[in-house]
Image: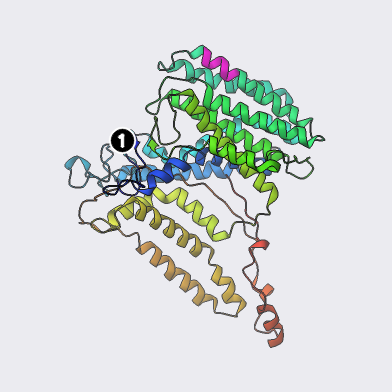
């Protein structure tokens, strides 16, 4: 299928197939899939370390975003045919696919519950992981809740045991439970030991490598089942363990960078050829193999699975070291708003765009993906209206500036207007990207900071000689 992947297997034959080569999407998705979601939860854990005080930061906001996203998805499902078999490729003209507004579902072949949850599974899991790891994070951050660490271990191992017992495809549940419990206890024990090695930064980094090895063992080496071909409790156990370890790694590794903590010394990065070798040994195949689910593959062979997960852990440590070596700038406000809108609204954007581009050359996955990003970016730009600050600095008319913002908003909304009666859609990728959830806070500036019409001409020229859109003065916090 043009622009993406479809089915269980797709060969990356583009370099030698001159007749019908595979799209570049096969190569790109197969490569980024290895570390995309583990890195997302790693960054989420890092953000939790930065915002954690007595309680996890932004917990209430994530609840609100989750409720809003699920509500929007439910409305989209109710306006469609409410039939999981009505995909955008073949639903046009089918009597059983005629809904109130749409004749397809944006998330086909996934039952009647998942299309409502859809992309919000990430925030739901994030809430669970924040609650589950609260005692460990509170102890590492503030030296509190030490008595609740045992409770955390009991709850975590209990969840793993429950998922392992109820699934009949897990042929050796007690072996799985035992290995899960062992790696979980060792991970928590090493994390606590790291708190006592603050004065030994070189040893602390070796301990971090040990945590990465334990994460690889639990995520990639425990034989949960011979194969996992669909979303099941076995698959839920697999991703729960893996994403929980990624989340915990992000917190523990970032904690050493915070004020009042002892940072770690570089070890592998001092001998950079080792990193090149590690990345080569753990590089994923560019051939697409679903291996159960789009979210993350469960390869049948233990060696393939362990090598794949190890590559994701290597990327996490690379990102962690780069974060210690480079100074990062705050995310621009319009990009933060745009990312949030894209995450919450991309099912609606895709549904409207699918109808709008039917019968045109834009009805492929790549075009719809690019248009969703452009629409959300423009919406974020309109929401922040950075040109309003420039207009006020130049003594512009406030009313005309707001009118201009309103006109641009109308143009953006007009691009999503459905065009009914179009032809059948030729192709559409059933895989839906998951976009990170962001938030930002911007320090507002009053017009007095830029001067008023009563200022002298020389004073105004002096003020206007400096750029006004200085993002350094803004603070930006990422929920993930």
Dominant SS type (magenta): helix
On screen, residue 226 versus residue 16, left or right, reads: right
- Location of residue 58 with respect to 157 vertically, above or below: below
On screen, residue 29 versus residue 452, left or right, reads: left
Taking depth in this image into account, of 198 and 408 the one nearest to the observer is 198
Mark 1, secondary structure of its residue: loop
Q: Which residue is mark 1?
A: 109
On screen, residue 278 versus residue 150, left or right, reads: left
How many numbered dots are placed on residues in this image?
1
- Location of residue 115 with respect to 386 vertically, above or below: above
Taking depth in this image into account, of 309 and 236 the one nearest to the observer is 309
- Tell me which segment is drawn in magenta: 175-181
On screen, residue 167 versus residue 81, left or right, reads: right
Q: 10 Å neighbourhood of mark 1: few (<14), some, or many (≥20)?
A: some
Identity of the residue drawn at 62% across and 28% down: 213
- Location of residue 403 with respect to 220 vertically, above or below: below
- Residue 435 percent coordinates (x, y): 47, 47
Identity of the residue drawn at 52% across and 39% down: 35
Identity of the residue drawn at 50% across and 51% down: 340
- Residue 417 percent coordinates (x, y): 32, 60
- Residue 280 percent coordinates (x, y): 54, 38
Residue 220 in sight from this viewpoint: yes
Q: Is residue 414 magenta?
A: no
- Residue 344 percent coordinates (x, y): 45, 48
Question: Image quadrant of residue 53?
Answer: top right
Question: Image quadrant of residue 471?
Answer: bottom right
Identity of the residue drawn at 54% across and 16% down: 177
Residue 144 in sight from this viewpoint: no
């Amino acid at each position: 299928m043009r622009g993406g992947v479809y089915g269980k297997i797709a060969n990356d034959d583009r370099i030698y197939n001159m007749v019908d080569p595979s799209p570049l999407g096969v190569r790109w998705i197969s490569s980024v899939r290895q570390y995309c979601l583990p890195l997302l939860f790693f960054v989420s854990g890092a953000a939790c370390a930065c915002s954690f005080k007595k309680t996890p930061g932004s917990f209430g906001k994530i609840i609100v975003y989750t409720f809003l996203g699920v509500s929007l998805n439910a409305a989209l499902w109710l306006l469609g045919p409410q039939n999981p078999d009505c995909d955008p490729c073949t639903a046009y003209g089918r009597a059983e696919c005629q809904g109130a507004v749409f004749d397809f579902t944006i998330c086909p072949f996934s039952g009647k519950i998942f299309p409502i949850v859809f992309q919000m599974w990430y925030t739901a899991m994030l809430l669970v992981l924040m609650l589950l790891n609260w005692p460990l994070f509170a102890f590492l951050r503030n030296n509190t809740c030490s008595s609740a660490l045992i409770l955390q271990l009991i709850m975590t191992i209990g969840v793993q045991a429950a998922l392992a017992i109820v699934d009949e495809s897990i042929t050796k549940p007690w072996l799985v439970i035992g290995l899960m419990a062992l790696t979980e206890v060792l991970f928590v024990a090493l994390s606590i030991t790291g708190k006592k090695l603050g004065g030994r930064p070189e040893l602390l980094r070796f301990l971090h490598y040990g945590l990465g090895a334990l994460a690889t063992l639990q995520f990639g080496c425990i034989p949960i089942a011979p194969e996992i071909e669909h979303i099941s409790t076995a698959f839920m156990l697999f991703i729960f363990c893996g994403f929980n370890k990624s989340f915990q790694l992000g917190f523990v590794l970032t904690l050493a960078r915070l004020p009042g903590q002892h940072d770690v010394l570089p070890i592998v990065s001092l001998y950079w050829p080792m990193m090149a070798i590690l990345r080569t040994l753990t590089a994923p195949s560019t051939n697409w193999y679903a291996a159960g689910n789009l979210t993350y593959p469960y390869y049948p062979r233990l060696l393939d699975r362990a090598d794949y997960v190890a590559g994701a852990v290597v990327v996490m440590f690379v990102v962690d070291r780069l974060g210690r070596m480079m100074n990062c700038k705050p995310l621009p406000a319009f990009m933060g708003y745009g990312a949030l809108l894209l995450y919450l609204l991309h099912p609606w954007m895709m549904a409207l765009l699918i109808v709008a581009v039917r019968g045109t050359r834009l009805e492929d996955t790549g075009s719809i993906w690019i248009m969703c990003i452009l629409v959300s970016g423009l919406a974020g730009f309109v929401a922040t209206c950075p040109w309003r600050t420039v207009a006020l600095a130049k003594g512009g008319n406030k009313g005309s500036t707001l009118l201009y913002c309103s006109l641009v908003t109308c143009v953006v909304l007009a691009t999503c207007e459905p065009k009914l009666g179009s032809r059948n859609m030729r192709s559409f990728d059933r895989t839906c990207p998951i976009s990170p959830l962001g938030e930002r806070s911007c320090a507002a500036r009053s017009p007095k900071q830029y001067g008023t019409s009563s200022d002298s001409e020389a004073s105004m020229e002096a003020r206007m000689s400096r750029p006004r859109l200085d993002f350094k003065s803004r603070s930006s916090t990422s929920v993930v």
